[in-house]
């Protein structure tokens, strides 16, 4: 069979995704170009985009414009060329757009090598003006020379000027049927929404580290080089999800290995070699350094850091590695080890698990914040080593400090003086001594002490209380919102239970706080002697209720209170208990013979509420004797 002029050569020149080693006599091609994907099947980590395009091509729903966005080196330009190849795919048996392009067609080689006359690639970074867009608009009027579609690939499209974007809008919205536009950008936010609305947008995702490791392993094997899994994991992490960046690092790592006389790579890529090449620190020594810091051993930490710097680790990079270690430990501690990074070696997982069991989450969070600040300072400092050492010293000397919640808990159990600088006349609150004991902040069972909410809690909240609101000399109710204006002669209320706290809020006419205390909090513990309250927040409770209750109790009772939040639920809410008691009382009332008789005669009748009789307010019978002396 005679081959046509337009048919591809007998031996395809398109390089597969994993090609063999470099043939003798040919110039060297870097790995990022040599293993550039040629088909949609070669793309890694972009399954969502490939599936969408597959369905679109099968159904014939091909858009006139495509917008590809993602980080550098993720494959935007390569995807644009593959898409142009699919739009113009043509063989003897196939003459329609398709994504099944494993076998090169008539135009595939020229398109992938950027030399096809109907696939025009333009770099918007160097062609930003309106004149360049006018050339595209003028060229779009004419049909393609050889291919099915005339495809315009504009890279870094966000660099176009405002006038260029405006000139492109009309043609982009209603292009000729033979024209397709493919845009690529790393700054999607800089592209006008008028352009985005005329395109199908595809966000190319960062490739995960495990997937990159597998990809690099296949390439290293194909190149005849040996590479340790730890070394490939280091390269994948350094790539930051970019395939091109990772291949460039792998290319450099393979080149750093020894070669024999024939020029063939004889060594293999190891983790220490990659660390030295990238200026990274040994992960095991990073965990040793973190262990020194968390134990507060500043001297050992500085010596360990100096040894890392002497061996080639950059100060900022060492702090970054420390931050990554803290993140790994925090993640393991938060997830219990589930979902730990697969890229960690067995030894690293062991160290991470051990440190996760020893360090608290507040301490890890504080270390993370301090390391981020240290990385920022070291990056700006003229002497990065000194700045990094100062960051480590700060971290070591704060490692043994208590966390904020521990400070609050320790302060909450202290006995604090109740006079607050006020006159002592007519005070019923006794003056307490210095802080000398701490309250156990652990949650207690619901059956303990006087804080238990029982069936009588409704009466305690709604009925009369055994404490007196502050009053002035005229007997008027005294507001204590401003402690500095409080007169000397008054009596503070005594609060001994949580029911009395709620009653106090109701008596002070603080409806919002009363509702939250009744419905949205669960009492865990109340110690009236030390002035501490432990609450568990239920759905609907505001986050600031603890601070709000503390400030108001301080003002209303004339003494210091500490309100803390517990992680364990305690008693049921007061409102829930009250409603339960009311329902039980209502059911009992319905069983009364008189009420039952009424309900029987009036089936549609309902008992809406029950009001107890106030017998104390009833007037006594006025019995007077008449003049005769008889009653």
Image (cartoon, grey):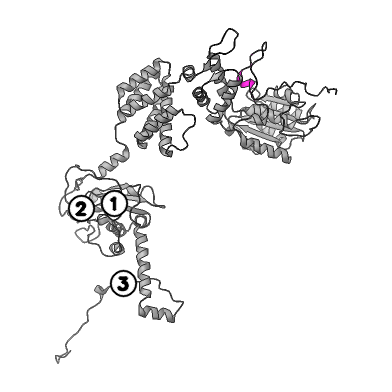
Tell me the crowding category of disc 1: few under 14, some 14 to 19, or many 20 or more residues within 10 angstroms, Cα based.
Answer: many
Tell me the CA gap for discs 3 and 2.
38 Å
Secondary structure state at the residue bearing disc 2: loop
Name which quarter of the figure residue 582 lies in.
bottom left
In the rendered image, residue 495, in percent from the top left (x then y), is placed at: 24, 55
Q: Is residue 397 left or right of residue 55?
A: left
In the rendered image, residue 569, in percent from the top left (x then y), is placed at: 35, 51
- Name the residue carrying label 2: 487
Q: Residue 553 carries which label?
A: none
Q: In this view, does 143 lie to the left or right of 204?
A: right
- Name the residue carrying label 3: 612
The quarter of the image holding the C terminus is bottom left
Residue 187 belongs to magenta span: no
Single out the residue that lies furthest toward the bottom.
628
- Name the residue carrying label 1: 525
Single out the residue that lies furthest toward the right.
2
- Asked if the residues shown at circle 2 and circle 1 are in contact, with their CB atoms under 8 angstroms apart, the answer is no
Q: Depth check: 597 or 162 in front?
A: 597
- Asked if the residues shown at circle 3 and circle 2 are in contact, with their CB atoms under 8 angstroms apart, the answer is no
Tell me the CA gap for discs 3 and 1.
31 Å
In the rendered image, residue 41, in percent from the top left (x then y), is placed at: 66, 31
Relative vertical location of residue 9 with respect to residue 560 in this rendering, above or below: above
* Mark 2 vs mark 1: in front: 1
Tell me the CA gap for discs 2 and 1.
33 Å
The magenta stretch spans which residues? 28-36
Residue for point 37% across, 17% down: 307
Secondary structure state at the residue bearing disc 1: strand
Residue 357 visible at all? yes
* Mark 3 vs mark 2: in front: 3
Tell me the crowding category of disc 2: few under 14, some 14 to 19, or many 20 or more residues within 10 angstroms, Cα based.
Answer: some
Name which quarter of the figure residue 281 lies in.
top left
């Amino acid at each position: 069979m005679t081959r046509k002029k337009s048919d591809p050569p007998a031996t395809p020149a398109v390089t597969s995704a994993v090609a063999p080693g470099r043939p003798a006599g040919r110039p060297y091609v870097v790995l990022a170009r040599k293993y550039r994907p040629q088909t949609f099947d070669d793309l890694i980590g972009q399954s969502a985009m490939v599936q969408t395009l597959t369905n679109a091509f099968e159904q014939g729903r091909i858009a006139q414009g495509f917008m590809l966005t993602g980080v550098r080196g993720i494959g935007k330009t390569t995807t644009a060329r593959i898409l142009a190849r699919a739009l113009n795919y043509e063989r003897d048996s196939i003459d329609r757009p398709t994504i099944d392009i494993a076998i090169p067609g008539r135009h595939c080689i020229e398109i992938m090598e950027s030399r096809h006359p109907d696939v025009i690639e333009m770099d918007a970074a160097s062609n930003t003006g309106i004149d360049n867009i006018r050339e595209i608009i003028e060229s779009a009027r004419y049909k393609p020379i050889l291919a099915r579609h005339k495809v315009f690939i504009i890279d870094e499209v966000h660099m176009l000027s405002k006038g260029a974007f405006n000139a492109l809008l009309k043609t982009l919205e209603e292009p000729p049927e033979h024209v397709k536009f493919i845009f690529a950008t790393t700054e999607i936010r800089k592209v006008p929404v008028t352009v985005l609305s005329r395109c199908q947008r595809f966000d190319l995702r960062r490739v995960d580290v495990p997937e990159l490791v597998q990809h690099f392993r296949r390439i290293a094997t194909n190149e005849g080089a040996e590479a340790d899994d730890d070394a490939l994991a280091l390269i994948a992490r350094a790539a930051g999800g970019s395939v091109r960046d990772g291949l460039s690092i792998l290319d450099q790592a393979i080149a750093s290995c020894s070669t024999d006389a024939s020029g063939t790579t004889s060594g293999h890529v190891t983790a220490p070699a990659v660390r030295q090449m990238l200026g990274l620190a040994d992960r095991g020594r990073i965990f040793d350094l973190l262990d020194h810091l968390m134990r507060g051993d500043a001297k050992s930490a500085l010596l360990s850091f100096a040894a890392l710097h002497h061996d080639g680790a950059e100060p900022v990079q060492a702090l970054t590695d420390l931050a990554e270690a803290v993140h790994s430990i925090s993640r393991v501690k938060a997830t219990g080890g589930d979902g730990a990074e697969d890229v960690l070696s067995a030894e690293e997982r062991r160290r991470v698990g051990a440190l996760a069991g020893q360090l608290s989450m507040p301490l890890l969070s504080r270390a993370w914040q301090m390391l981020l600040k240290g990385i920022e300072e070291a990056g700006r400092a003229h002497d990065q080593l000194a700045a990094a050492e100062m960051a480590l010293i700060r971290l070591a000397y704060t490692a043994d400090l208590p966390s904020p919640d521990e400070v609050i808990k320790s302060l909450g159990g202290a006995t604090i003086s109740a006079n607050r600088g006020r006159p002592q006349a007519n005070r019923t609150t006794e003056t307490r001594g210095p802080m000398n004991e701490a309250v156990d902040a652990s949650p207690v069972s619901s059956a303990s002490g006087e804080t238990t909410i029982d069936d009588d809690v409704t009466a305690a909240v709604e009925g009369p209380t055994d404490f007196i609101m502050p009053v002035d000399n005229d007997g008027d109710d005294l507001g204590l919102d401003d402690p500095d204006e409080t007169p000397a002669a008054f009596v503070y209320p005594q609060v001994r239970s949580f029911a009395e706290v709620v009653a106090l809020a109701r008596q002070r006419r603080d409806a919002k706080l009363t509702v939250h205390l009744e419905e949205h909090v669960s009492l865990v513990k109340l110690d009236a002697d030390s002035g501490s309250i432990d609450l568990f927040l239920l759905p609907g409770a505001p986050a600031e209720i603890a601070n709000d209750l503390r400030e108001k109790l301080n003002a209303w009772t004339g003494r210091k209170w500490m309100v803390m939040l517990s992680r364990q639920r305690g008693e049921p809410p007061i409102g829930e208990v009250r409603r339960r008691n009311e329902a039980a009382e209502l059911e009992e009332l319905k069983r009364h013979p008189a009420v039952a008789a009424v309900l029987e005669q009036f089936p549609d009748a309902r008992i809406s509420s029950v009001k107890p009789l106030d017998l104390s307010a009833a007037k006594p019978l006025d019995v007077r004797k008449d003049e005769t002396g008889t009653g």
